[in-house]
């Protein structure tokens, strides 16, 4: 009889904690039906403990947290977080410089919020379709396959981080390079966007194998 | 809950704008609110409706800014606000010198805004009010890391650049003592080392800041660069800088030449020089540089450091030296060090304040800490120290043996601080050893023109009283000398003299007046031909216990040009216009017991001025000697008093360094004119002076007043004074002695008021 080694200590009854503040600030009438049902369920069910990297603070962002965790090496969260903060500061500084030197009518178009840029860049980097290696009759085919949201996000972040780790000059620091890449991705240019396009082209060219997919 | 929701609503952009401003700490644009709504706000704000958010944010941020961009006009109301420096000015004034985080901020926000801080304002007031004829003042800015020392320095540099000074800005002296790739042996001095790269980069930046000065300032000497090239005398300084830049090998020497020329020429007044050094503790620290034989280099061996150290000495004038101490970048200093003595070490004693050196004419006793001589007991205790006593004895014996005929001792002593204790002890010593010689003591107090803390005033009062009592006991005659109007706690306006415009606040002036009076009063026993000695004088004035005498002087005596003594005295029938110099105020002295009067500077009467056969005008015109004339005059003024008089033809010399504070109505010889000579009145070389030492009833009032004020004090409150070494018993005895001394001068007229007072000691 096999027992799973990695399993949650909570039983199925436990519900996830609600971190989103805006939901709590809505009045009862503003809630939709599912939300109302959820709130009623919470009255009777136990709630899991919130993990320590999840807060209701205005400054916490799940995407940024996930990205920081992916950047982390050997469990050095402090370093990863500081690199993330420096990256966002670098993005802000670059955009502010552009903003202050731009003429009046163009000032509106310059986006200065680094969080906005980060999310937009990640969104631009996400592939729409992925490739999966499926072996049929001894040959491995690259089959185009739809990707889940999580997988898309993961791929975008992974490409970003590997690109910044590998293809940079020895002396440039991570925040500098990352901020460059993010800004380029925000404007739909740069190496990661190119990689995404390459993937899309591969998927397009391997359309014929699409029927190999059984899910 | 519900009001909080509106924070993230796009509609209430005004409120969110202010919060954004506070959250983003004066950064240029919208703050980052990462939630989903915040994202919407961010993108919306960047588009059309955000205009309101931005303008309202900027409007609310205006409270942190000021439009005053000229540092000369910065005052207290600009404190804590940021002012902008135009970017071209930043490039011109600060090619180097701004800290690198600040330079990054300039790049990001496209503006340079500096905060006006209180220490910077203080420094600017000092710079504005300093006199450039005096030796240069060295300011040191110190503090913990990140508190704004370099930015304060830059503020001051900006002010000086705006005012047209020549700015010598060394951005970080630590860069000159570490990480030097090329260390060359100097061609000028064999044991020094040159740093061509650092010197040339500094010269380049110096040229950018001070272009216009380099054309105007000319060299005063010929300088040889190597064997063939030279810069002639009279060439503009720019040529020296060009030479340093063109030939990098000569750059360090060029820097030395520039520094030397500027130091010499700044005193001439053509320009003002500001030497601004950041991290000045590097000049006296250690270096991490090594010579080729791996031996460490000390800072003196570097040409640049050696030349800069010479600028730090205050032997030049016409500018200011503002420096900063910095631990960041310093070598071999712990990161917690920020105080001057930690970062500078022994040099701080020279650089920051001169150590208090106390050397009088005779004594060279160890320098004392400031404030240790504030009470009588301190001075007393000092003189009990056997080393001091021995030294005093040695010196006394030395001088006494040199004398042919020792008349006595003249002791001049400050009464207002603990020095009165020293003087008392010294006089006691002299009295014990040389009892047959005269001891004349003069107790001096500076002019007090405003009340300081009550403690200081009370200490002054106590010191004065104790000094008077002790000095008069042990000496043959004591005379208090001061331009104060009263010895008590409340200061009154100081004594004024006609024809003399002196500044009572300056010790220089008041001591000059007292010196003239002292010089005149002591003439009777100092002249070689005079029969009376110091002891005779003392005994004449101080009989039956009257050990205190008052001094009066008229500085200058108003003698009209061409008048003789007779004419002068005839015009002054009410009395000579002299003022009491013994803290009695502006009382008119009408009676005295005994006096010794000296008049000097009046020309002798020419015999031909009166025709033979002409009837004499007054009793004074019979053929008499000058002294007899004066004696008669004094008899008429002070009947019943015992007066001795001396008349000298030689006036009191007032050549420099004597201050020139006489009225323009006086000639070069100090004689009076009807109207001033003209716009250029000549310097007064000598003045006639009339001075007297009197013992009279005026001293009763003086000493009585002092006694009354002392009795009114509560000794328990001033226990600190007594802790210095004075016993309560001694104090009581001194009070009694003062009372007795005051009563010596009592005449029957004052007897009535004194009977009313009860002695409740």
Image (spheres, helix red, strand yellow):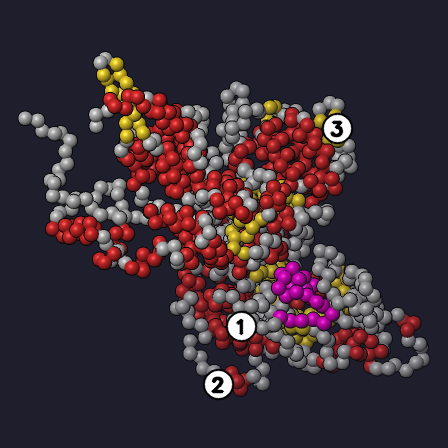
Please give the name of the residue rendered at 44% of the width and 72% of the height, measured from the top-left corner: B713
Q: Which residue is mark 1?
A: B490
Image position, residue B121 (x, y; %)? 55, 55
Q: Is residue B98 above or below residue B576?
A: above
Q: Which residue is mark 2?
A: B756
Q: Residue at x 68, y 51 (%)?
A: B133
Asked if residue B515 lies in the magenta stretch, the reply is yes
Sequence-wise, the earlier of marks 2 and 1 is 1
Mark 1 residue crowding within 10 angstroms, few (<14) / some (14–19) / many (20+): some
Foreground pick, B225 / B508: B225
Q: What residue range appears in magenta?
A: B494-518
Is residue B57 something one can see in this rendering?
Answer: no
**Marks 3 and 1 belong to one chain:** yes
Provide residue B611's location: percent of width, then percent of height: 93, 76
Horizontal side of A177 relative to B94 (left or right) equals left
Q: CA distance from mark 2 to mark 1?
A: 24 Å
Q: Nearer the viewer, residue B165 or B487?
A: B165
Which numbered disc, 3 or 2, marks the residue closer to the eye? 3
Q: Earlier in the sequence, mark 3 or mark 1?
A: 3
Q: Quadrant of residue B96?
A: top right
Chain ID at mark 1: B
Classed neighbour count for the residue bearing mark 3: other residues with Cα under 10 Å, few (<14), some (14–19), many (≥20): few
């Amino acid at each position: 009889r096999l027992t799973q080694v990695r399993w949650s200590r909570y039983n199925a009854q436990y519900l996830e904690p609600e971190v989103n503040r805006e939901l709590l600030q809505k009045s009862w009438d503003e809630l939709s039906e599912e939300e109302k049902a959820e709130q009623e369920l919470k009255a009777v069910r136990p709630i899991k403990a919130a993990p320590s990297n999840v807060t209701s603070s205005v400054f916490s962002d799940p995407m940024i947290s996930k990205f920081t965790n992916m950047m982390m090496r050997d469990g050095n969260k402090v370093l990863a977080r500081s690199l993330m903060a420096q990256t966002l500061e670098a993005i802000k500084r670059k955009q502010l410089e552009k903003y202050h030197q731009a003429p009046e009518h163009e000032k509106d178009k310059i986006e200065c919020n680094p969080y906005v840029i980060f999310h937009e860049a990640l969104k631009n980097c996400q592939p729409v379709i992925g490739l999966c290696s499926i072996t049929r009759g001894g040959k491995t085919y690259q089959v185009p396959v739809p990707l889940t949201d999580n997988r898309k996000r993961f791929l975008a972040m992974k490409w970003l981080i590997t690109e910044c780790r590998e293809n940079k000059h020895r002396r440039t620091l991570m925040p500098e390079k990352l901020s460059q890449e993010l800004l380029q991705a925000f404007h739909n240019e740069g190496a990661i966007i190119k990689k995404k396009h390459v993937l899309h082209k591969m998927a397009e060219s391997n359309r014929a194998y699409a029927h190999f997919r059984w899910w | 809950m519900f009001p909080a929701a509106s924070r993230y609503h796009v509609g209430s952009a005004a409120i969110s704008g202010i919060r954004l401003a506070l959250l983003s700490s004066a950064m240029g644009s919208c703050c980052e609110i990462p939630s989903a709504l915040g994202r919407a706000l961010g993108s919306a704000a960047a588009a059309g409706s955000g205009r309101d958010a931005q303008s309202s944010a900027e409007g609310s941020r205006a409270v942190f800014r000021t439009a005053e961009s000229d540092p000369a006009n910065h005052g207290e109301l600009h404190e804590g606000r940021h002012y902008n420096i135009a970017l071209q000015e930043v490039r011109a004034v600060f090619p180097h010198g701004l800290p690198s985080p600040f330079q990054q901020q300039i790049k990001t926000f496209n503006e340079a805004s500096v905060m006006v801080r209180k220490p910077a304002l203080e420094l600017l007031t000092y710079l504005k009010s300093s006199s450039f004829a005096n030796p240069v003042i060295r300011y040191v800015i110190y503090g913990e890391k990140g508190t704004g020392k370099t930015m304060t320095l830059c503020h001051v540099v900006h002010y000086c650049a705006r005012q047209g000074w020549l700015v010598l800005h060394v951005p970080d002296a630590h860069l000159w003592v570490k990480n030097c790739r090329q260390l060359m042996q100097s061609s000028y001095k064999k044991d020094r080392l040159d740093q061509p790269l650092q010197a040339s980069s500094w010269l380049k930046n110096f040229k950018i800041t001070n272009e216009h000065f380099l054309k105007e300032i000319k060299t005063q000497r010929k300088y040889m660069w190597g064997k063939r090239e030279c810069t002639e005398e009279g060439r503009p300084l720019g040529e020296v800088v060009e030479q340093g830049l063109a030939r990098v090998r000569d750059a360090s020497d060029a820097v030395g030449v520039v520094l030397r020329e500027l130091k010499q020429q700044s005193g001439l007044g053509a320009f003002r020089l500001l030497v601004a050094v950041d991290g000045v503790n590097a000049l006296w620290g250690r270096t991490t540089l090594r010579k080729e034989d791996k031996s460490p280099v000390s800072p003196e061996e570097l040409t640049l450091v050696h030349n800069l150290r010479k600028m730090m000495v205050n032997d030049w004038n016409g500018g200011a030296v503002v420096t900063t101490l910095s631990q960041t970048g310093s070598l071999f200093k712990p990161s917690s060090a920020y105080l001057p003595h930690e970062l500078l070490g022994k040099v701080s004693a020279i650089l920051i304040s001169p150590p208090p050196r106390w050397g009088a004419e005779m004594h060279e006793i160890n320098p004392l800490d400031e404030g240790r001589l504030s009470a009588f007991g301190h001075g007393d205790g000092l003189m009990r120290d056997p080393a001091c006593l021995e030294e005093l004895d040695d010196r006394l014996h030395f001088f006494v043996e040199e004398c042919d005929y020792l008349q006595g001792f003249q002791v001049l002593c400050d009464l207002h601080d603990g020095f009165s204790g020293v003087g008392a002890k010294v006089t006691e010593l002299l009295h014990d050893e040389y009892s047959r010689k005269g001891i004349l003591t003069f107790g001096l107090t500076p002019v007090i023109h405003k009340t300081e803390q009550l403690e200081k005033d009370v200490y002054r009062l106590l010191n004065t009283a104790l000094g008077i009592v002790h000095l008069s006991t042990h000496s043959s005659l004591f005379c208090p000398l001061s331009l104060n109007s009263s010895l008590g706690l409340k200061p009154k306006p100081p004594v004024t003299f006609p024809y003399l415009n002196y500044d009572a606040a300056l010790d220089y002036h008041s001591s000059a007046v007292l010196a003239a009076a002292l010089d005149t009063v002591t003439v009777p026993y100092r002249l070689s031909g005079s029969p009376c000695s110091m002891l005779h004088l003392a005994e004449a004035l101080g009989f039956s216990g009257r050990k205190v005498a008052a001094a009066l002087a008229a500085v200058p005596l108003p003698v009209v040009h061409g008048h003789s003594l007779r004419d002068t005295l005839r015009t002054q029938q009410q009395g000579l216009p002299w003022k009491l110099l013994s803290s009695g105020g502006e009382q008119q002295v009408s009676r005295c017991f005994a006096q010794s009067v000296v008049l000097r500077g009046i020309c002798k009467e020419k015999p031909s001025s009166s025709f033979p056969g002409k009837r004499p005008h007054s009793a004074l015109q019979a053929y008499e000697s000058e002294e007899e004339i004066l004696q008669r005059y004094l008899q008429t003024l002070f009947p019943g008093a015992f007066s001795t008089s001396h008349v000298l033809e030689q006036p009191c010399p007032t050549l420099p360094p004597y201050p020139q504070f006489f009225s323009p109505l006086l000639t070069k010889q100090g004689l009076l004119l009807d109207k001033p000579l003209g716009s250029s009145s000549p310097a007064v070389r000598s003045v006639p002076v009339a001075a007297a030492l009197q013992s009279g009833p005026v001293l009763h009032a003086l000493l009585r007043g002092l006694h009354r004020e002392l009795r009114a004090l509560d000794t328990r409150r001033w226990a600190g004074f007594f802790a210095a070494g004075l016993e309560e018993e001694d104090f009581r005895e001194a009070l009694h002695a003062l009372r007795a001394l005051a009563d010596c001068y009592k005449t029957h007229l004052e007897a009535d008021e004194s009977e009313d007072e009860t002695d409740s000691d």
